Image: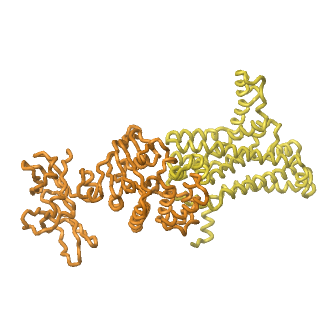
Chain colours: A yellow, B orange
Amino acid sequence: MTKSKSGTLRDLLPALPLAALFLVGFVLPLTVLGALSFFQSPEFTELGFDQYRRFADDGLAFSILADTLLIGAEVATLSLCLAYPLGLVYLAAGPRLRTILTFLIMLPLLTSTVVRTFAWIVILGREGIVNSIMQALGIWDQPARLIYTWGGLILALTQIQLPLMALPLINSLIRLDPTLPKAAEGLGASRVRVFFTVILPLTRPGAVAGWLLVFAAASTAFITQSLIGGGRIILMPLYIYQQAVGEQAWPFAAALSLIFTAAVIAVVVAVDRLGKDRTAARTARLKAEAAPAASADAGIAAMVSLKPEQADIGRPNA
Amino acid sequence: MERAHGHRLTLTGIEHHFGATRALEAISLDVAPGEFVALLGPSGCGKTTLLQIIGGFIVPDAGAVQLDGRHVEAVPANRRGVGMVFQSYALFPHLSVFENVAYGLKARGERRERVAAKVAEMLALVQMQHFADRRPAELSGGQQQRVALARALAVEPAVILLDEPFSALDKNLRLDMQIEIKRLLNGYGVTSIMVTHDQEEALSMADRVVVMNHGRIEQIDTPEALYDRPASLFVNQFIGHANLIGGTISSTGDIRLSAGYDLVLSPRQSAAAQPGSRVLVSLRPENLKLVPTATPGALQARLTAVLPLGGTEVIEAELASGETVKIHRSRTAQSDRPRPGAAVGLAITDLSSIGVFPAPPT
């Protein structure tokens, strides 16, 4: 089919406001960051690659980057392990329970990240709920340090980002033909075997999508990382902030931002490849022919489209 | 081939509820080794629920399921040894044909060589040996069905269950597959239970048909007996077309049709009828023939429609009582074509194959 050029342009017209916003709010700052990163010093006098050289020579900056990617991967993997049982419960539930579960899963998205993070401080703090209960029961003699720890941060990030995992995963699970697990069971497979040989491979696209969303959101979650880490755990977003605002080292902060962004994108692309092999494409084609989902399920499907905005929370602001 | 694959299936007093709704009631059925039985009925009659109970996907509220006399009600699907071919075939889309057929064998922990040999045997049985590396999405509907059958048979199930196996196939392919599957299952000698709402499918494939309605068994019989001697008005109407004509039992035990005709019945046909009670008489369309109006004893009627269907012809006629009947007869190029509106006489070819049922209360 041929289409005149003006017709194509007219078709794209409705996208213009968003494109303008994207240009001003994303492409422009990123270009400015790129430009900034090539100044040799905070005085912006000479151009050069010193900032990138500094990163390469600085073991601390590199280990902070590695820690940040690691926490993203750990939170995403823990979320995945928690979201599958939740998804299977959702799948087995009747329509009313599904509506309730959908609401509960989305509820955290309706509260600010700051509020959710403070809730975790209340729970994990020195005089927080966990410590008070454990001491009152006489199990712990003195308050344990839960907050400002790696484990505490993973716990808080997992709870806060879980909806980003649960929604795409449940979306994948409800599109799974329910007769497939049944057929596997009928052929003599145990429940565990059915999960690993049928359910897991056929819902991999949803699992990968959820993993990527949580990875991107958790590794860049400035607010939660800073408040739960309390300055004792330094990850890239906080490090960039310190360099930019504390040290006034804008060119270095800019270089860190670009390196961090590139590293996150590299992981996303690599993992995305895993979910988009021949099988996934084939499955997607088959799924497209599947029957339309019920109303509660459609709610989940609709909410999945919320994810990119959520992933933006806590993007490093260098 | 040998009949070693067949096992006896016995259902006794099966009862099941979904919430307050009774889905199945007093279901008892004995299926001989190697027999092919069809569960036939309208949607919602409980036939699929019964299949799920046999397969172990549903535990019945009451009653016994036995395989070769062994009670299996409490044995879950993955250990019951009953093979199931699903309506959608339920082939695993991410696995090849080979891996699909091998799935059950691997789940049972069979050795690799044994798995490969058995899969090859099964694919040869369904003539799909050249498609082992294909994915289900790359197969036609008929091929997918054969793979599904091979996958179910590979684990040597005691009984094989077929859930509306032909409904996803288009009409031309359906008959071919019905013939092929029947020959295959017969040759293999496996006990088979098929669920269907399609009476032609049930009659053409099964050794015996179980007609179900509202969670109960209406009749269990051979396809011929169901058509020729239906046990209830429901079976009579569900299997084939039935012309139902109202009448009253006379004092002599004969039937006076409202269309003004007296039928003399055999004792078997009128046994249940009390003199004076109202009845419905069932005349199959091929049991009526057109005769000249002056023929003694002919029912007087008026033609309302003539539908030529190639080798046969369907004729609709209205009786003096206002009741309409359909007549099937074979047609050739030489046949005279009756005109709608013409007055005709109708004669009954075979009085002994008339069904008589008590009229339902109005």
Considering every residue shown, the one lying at the far bottom of the view is B334
Q: Position of residue B281 (x, y in %)?
A: 17, 54
For the point 13% across and 56% down, the residue is B321
For the point 82% across and 56% down, the residue is A34
Q: Is residue B119 above or below residue B63?
A: below
For the point 39% across and 39% down, the residue is B62
Quadrant including the N terminus of chain B = bottom left
Q: Position of residue B120 (x, y in %)?
A: 55, 64
Relative horizontal placement of residue A87, taking residue B329 as reference (left or right): right
Relative horizontal placement of residue B104, taking residue A54 as reference (left or right): left
Q: How many marks?
A: 0
Quadrant including the C terminus of chain B = top left
Q: Position of residue A125 (x, y in %)?
A: 75, 29
Q: Is residue B229 above or below residue B126?
A: above
Q: Is residue B7 above or below residue A282?
A: above
Pick the front one: B48 or A300: B48
Pick the front one: B302 or B208: B208
Residue A25 in sight from this viewpoint? yes
Q: Position of residue A68 (x, y in %)?
A: 79, 46
Residue B207 occupies quadrant: bottom left
Residue B163 in sight from this viewpoint? no
Pick the front one: B193 or B86: B193
Relative horizontal placement of residue A4, taking residue A145 as reference (left or right): left
Relative horizontal placement of residue A46, taking residue B71 as reference (left or right): right
For the point 65% across and 38% down, the residue is A111
